[in-house]
Image (tube, rainbow, N blue to C red):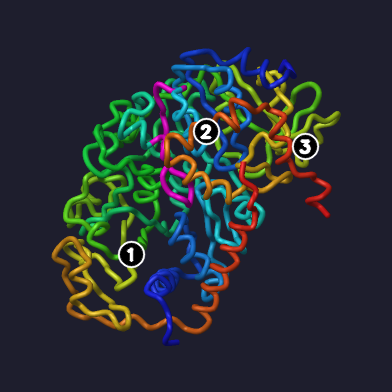
Amino acid sequence: MAKIVSLAEAVGDNVRDGDTVAMEGFTHLIPYAAGHEVIRQGRKDLYLVRMTPDILYDQLIGVGAARGMKFSWGGNPGVGSLHRFRDAVENQWPRPLEIEEHSHAAMANAYEAGAANLPFATLRGYIGADLPKVNPNIKSVTCPFTGEVLAAVPAIRPDVTIIHAQRADRQGNVLIEGIVGVQKEAVLAAKRSIVTVEEIVDELRPPSPNSLVLPSWAVTSVAHVPGGAFPSYAHGYYPRSNAFYIGWDEIARDRDSFSAWIKENVLDAKPDDFAKHAGSRAAKAA
Amino acid sequence: MSDFTPTEMMTIAAARALSNDDVCFVGIGAPSAACNVARLTHAPDITLIYESGTVGTKPDVLPLSIGDGELCDTALFTVSVPEMFRYWLQGGRITTGFLGGAQIDRFANLNTTVVGPYDHPKVRLPGGGGAPEIASNCGRIFITMALSKRGFVEKLPFITSMGHGKGGNHRERLGMKTKGPTRVITDLCILEPDPETKELTVVSIHQGVTREQIVENCGWAIRFAEQVIETPVPTELELATLRDINARTKKAHQGDKEVA
């Protein structure tokens, strides 16, 4: 059964130095508050996994918390570069970053393989592309039935997966709605998991029998962090702050302005500070 | 309509490539603008799919990211990312993929990964995302990007997604059954692969653009098809639709000023 704890406890209990950590959320429901807590607790030598590193991994890379990263698209969506990621790859600042690069299709398949307790994923992918030449973890298998040669990538099995969701009940069952990305697969593929939520409610009330629910017994820790996905968003609660994503470009371009931003907004801040970004559902409905 | 910018011409020419029956996998940026102009003008029933899992989406403003809430709010339905890539894309359900890129070569191969050597890049670009499998699994591919020497290069430092490879029947030789890139829409002209060699050749030139301009802005010795037409100028409806959605988008993206 999931333990309902504070964010500091959830990160303290589950994230260790050197861990392979997946923080997922495909543009939507990115677990920013939890990522900031990982930075505040000074975790180091992490191996980060995420399809779209986004600003959150730009921050973790920029503070030097990561030794490596597995990913498939490393930009600021619609804006341009992730400057801290680029500085790490191009100039090894603040430390070298070992990268393992895939396509989205391969990453999605690899999470699914992890959730299914398989050692690898297979897909009709990477045909004519150069990534297999630079990533030794992209191999091929021959179909035993048809002889077709298909791409193969290792399953993703994180030590810990961290996601954000709309709500949990008091038993720790979690409901996810909207663009659900690869969060279910990422949680089920991991040894441990943390879910931060906008709300903890008495009755979960999934809106459909087919709703995406992660049962309490498949989650390690749940923490109540309203606004915890900002500047990403929580469907039904608050919108994506596209203005923040645009503004990040200038903050992250320069090492000093980045470090000053991290000090003010991460190191000197606390999880409750995210609450100001949480929209009221009633206000949204009105 | 006489007064329009080259970028507007590009987006509208790209929109015209799409039809009502298309099921289109939409890349962010210029492709997204073109696909939505098509939907709001001549192709109201087109199915637009974004890789975040939103199917049949009808955004009122253009998304900044591939997974803006607007896409999910206006979609017929939304699936997980593994389902999107496995069942819908790899399953062969998508007629058309619409891509942009940082660099392209004469066989419509694209690079969005690195400039310079992969291990010591001069510029680290975002990477492929969905493109490698979009390029191979969609029925056909349209590409839209502005024509420039930096973008249209003799040799790509890295092939992120394959177009026609080394030309000719290269795709078939690799077992691909899809058509690959069939049209590249730029701000100066429209290119299509030669039926035999698959080298991109100019088939249509936008109004007011000269052949010299096209040659000067392309990094390889670009060829012109035997029959080259002038691209029809934007209609009032096309131009008004594009300007309206751009204005709505700008307002929406800058409307949430709260930072940090």
Residue A106: image x %, image y %? 41, 35
Tag 1, which chain?
Answer: B
Residue at 27%, 79% in the rendered image: B209
Distance of label 3 from label 1 (alpha carbons): 47 Å
Which class describes the residues within 10 Å of circle 1: few (<14), some (14-19), or many (20+)? many
Residue toward you, A174 or A99: A99
Q: Which residue is mark 1?
A: B146
Image quarter of the C terminus of chain A: bottom right
Q: Secondary structure at mark 1?
A: loop
Residue at 44%, 17% in the rendered image: A45
The magenta-colored residue range is: A65-85
Under mark 3, the amino acid is Pro
Q: Which residue is mark 3?
A: A206
Residue B21: image x %, image y %? 50, 67
Q: Which residue is mark 2?
A: A260
Residue B230: image x %, image y %? 30, 83
Q: Is residue B52 magenta?
A: no
